[in-house]
Image (cartoon, rainbow, N blue to C red):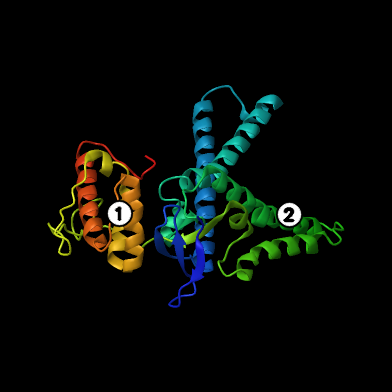
Amino acid sequence: MSAAAKPLVADKRARMLVTPEGIVLPIMLASRGSRAGALILDVIIIFTSAIAFLLALIWIAGGMLEGTALDPSGAPQGAKEFLQILLVLVLFCGWYGYFLVQELGPRGATLGKRITGIRIAARGGGRLTAEAVIARNLLRDIEIFYPLIALLVVLVQSQNGEDVGLLGWAMTGWFALFLLFPFFNRDALRAGDIIAGTWVVERPRAKLPEVLSTQGAAAVRGASEVTGARYSFGEAELAVYGEKELQTLERMLRDAEPAALATVHATICRKLGWEPGAGDERAFLEAFYAQLRAKLEGDMRFGKRKADKFS
């Protein structure tokens, strides 16, 4: 099942996402400005951390050598090369690890994205895979940083009087092509998003007042006002979903149309092995929501946490 690319009338960045389970979720694409701001913040964080690490390393090494007969300038060439290789490896792991570890986490966002209120998501509505995150981050270097570094090198060579020919224009065209790529498609996708099957969306503003607190939760109305039925779910039935699905269901109960609730009702019934009825969807979903929430809260008191249905 893929995401529907149909924009809503209210906002050009609004989309309806269809999950593999058939649940329709309203989402908002991140603006190009917030994406650029997040990347700038991330680069600042990475470079600041790298400089702080390097200064701390120099300070520690200087303190260790102080008062000894060792002269850092007289160190063997092999030792210097080893330290240089080590520094390159640390910077490499820090650069790629920063993006990969955070975007593969449950929030799907780096510190910069969290500050600007955005995150990455799979366009097909499924779970964000490691392959997708790796692909979009590797492509970012090809799109932005490699041509930018090449441009800086060409400028330095030109300042030193070297003939660079058309290389500068070629690098400028490369950089401009990928930099302006999000302006030429309505979902503001960069090349890495297209290849990885991802897009960048705003994080939902509707949040629980506290982590799995009962404030503002949908309450169980006891017997259904429509059929009089009372819905009760066992431990095994409530164990199929986690916190992520709970919050999704809460948003659906607040904002979704009856047709969307009917789809969610049928999906959950199939997951539980129940035979879905008709006409009592909201009462069923409210009961399932309240009992799932109570179960997750109880588990958290004993140190158990279920982030999503995959946990």
Q: CA distance from mark 2 to mark 1?
A: 60 Å
Q: How far across and how far down the image is residue 119, in percent?
A: 46, 56
Q: How far across and how far down the image is residue 260, in percent?
A: 36, 64
Closer to the camera in the image, 66 or 118: 118
Q: How far across and how far down the image is residue 11, in percent?
A: 45, 75
* Label whose residue precedes the other's in the sequence (2 or 1): 2
Q: What residue is shown with label 1?
A: 276
Q: Quadrant of residue 58?
A: top right
**Considering only vertical position in the picture, is 204 above or below 97?**
below
Neighbor class of circle 2 (other Cα within 10 Å; few <14, some 14-19, many 20+) is: some
Q: Quadrant of residue 182?
A: bottom right
Q: Residue at x 86, y 61 (%)?
A: 165
Specify the label residue 104 is tagged with.
none
Circle 2 or circle 1, nearest the eye:
1
Side (left or right) of 69 relative to 282: right
Closer to the camera in the image, 232 or 15: 232
Neighbor class of circle 1 (other Cα within 10 Å; few <14, some 14-19, many 20+) is: some
Q: What residue is shown with label 2?
A: 150
Q: Amino acid at mark 2?
A: Ala
